[in-house]
Amino acid sequence: MKIEELCQILTKEISSEQIHMNEPMSRHTSFKVGGNADIFIKVKNIDELKYVIKIAKKNNVHMTIIGNGSNILVKDKGIRGIVVKVEFEEMKIEPIQNNEVLVTVGAGMGIAKLAQELQKNSITGFEFASGIPGTIGGAVKMNAGAYGKEMKDIVVSTKCMDLKRYYMLAETTNIDDIEITEIVEKSDEPEILELNNQEQEFTYRDSIFADKRYVILETKLKLSYGNIEEIKNKMEELNKSRREKQPSMPSAGSTFKRGEDYITAKLIDECGLKGYTIGGAQVSEKHAGFIINTGEATAQDILDLIAYVKKVVFEKKQKCISLEIEVLGE
């Protein structure tokens, strides 16, 4: 079987414990839905990522890169090809002038974990993000924000891998239809760049990384030293507010983006859609901007509910609302 054959090649550079065949994506997304990935790989460092990319390219296999799956919806038929979960968690703290500090952190580190590490080191400026689910790479990619601040306010630069000329494949590839190639040219490597803040083209819940040309490897944040107790209290205050306002059921966070001149959750609420349910998917009764999995939802239930909400909001409010989450697979 071709999937097994490809996995055998991958195990030459990556531990077999990090590679899974026909892996349910429901195990790797906060929505807790989604079909299987043909091959699912956790990569721990840049060399492992480069190797997977090379093998995928040589065999014309589509590759999807994710963080911890907190902002994606995987369709019920799953994802063809290789899904790579980036688990880079290195962290470095460099004091600079005027009580400021540069924190370099791997793209795979969880935001909550980073917030705790910064608190331990009396570093302030990241409290606003401490309750956002996901990884630092995902936060940079979507310019995540809360309580009036966004990642663009603290990101100095981001190291990334440029795949434009190196890796271009169709959106889906059937592994059973390809011939497996083991040869990997050592000289054929993607370019690694470091983009400054302006080059990352941050806008509301968007950045240059959204077009998938770049893979985020690590980012550098400019923060400052503060009082550890004040940092702790601020984090607790913001996280308490988040728990009180947002649902605890499985979701991918805020489903829809805010509009330029309106708050989408408010429009959905005014349309009487709070609690509206299709299958196991529901518009949260706690926060209308969230679609949740009540326990038995399929990805199609969620997609159908998204489509219905968009339709009703357009009919009643003449507004075209757009998704904040990313839909993957087939």
Image (cartoon, helix red, strand yellow):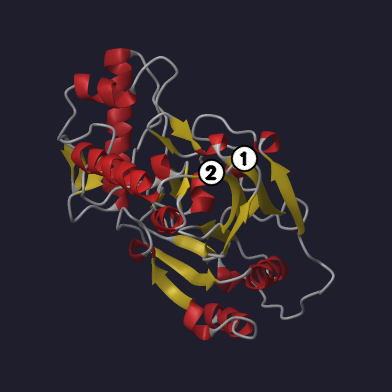
Name above or below for residue 277 compared with residue 319. Answer: below
Name above or below for residue 71 compared with residue 36. Answer: above
Q: Please state the horizontal and vertical placement of residue 2, each as a whole percent of the image.
A: 57, 79
Kindly identify which residue carries mark 2.
224
Q: Please state the horizontal and vertical placement of residue 145, each as a whole percent of the image.
A: 44, 36
Q: Residue at x 26, y 15 (%)?
A: 316
Q: Please state the horizontal and vertical placement of residue 43, each as a whole percent of the image.
A: 56, 70
Along the line of sight, which residue is nearer the eye, 145 or 170? Answer: 145
For this view, does 148 lie left or right of residue 62? left
Residue type at mark 2: give it. Answer: Ser
Which residue occupies the extreme right position in the image? 187
Q: Residue at x 17, y 36 (%)?
A: 286
Quadrant where the C terminus is found in the figure: bottom left
Residue type at mark 1: give it. Answer: Asn
- Rate crowding at label 2 as few (under 14), some (14 to 19) or many (20 or more) other CA atoms within 10 Å: some
Secondary structure of residue under mark 2: strand
Secondary structure of residue under mark 1: loop
For this view, does 141 lie left or right of residue 189? left
Task: Tell us which disc is closer to us: 1 or 2.
Answer: 1
Precedes in sequence: disc 1 or disc 2: 1
Work out how far the residue at label 1 is from the one at label 2, CA to CA, in angstroms. Answer: 8 Å
Q: Please state the horizontal and vertical placement of residue 292, each as a whole percent of the image.
A: 24, 45
Kindly identify which residue carries mark 1.
98
Callouts 1 and 2 close, C-beta under 8 Å:
yes
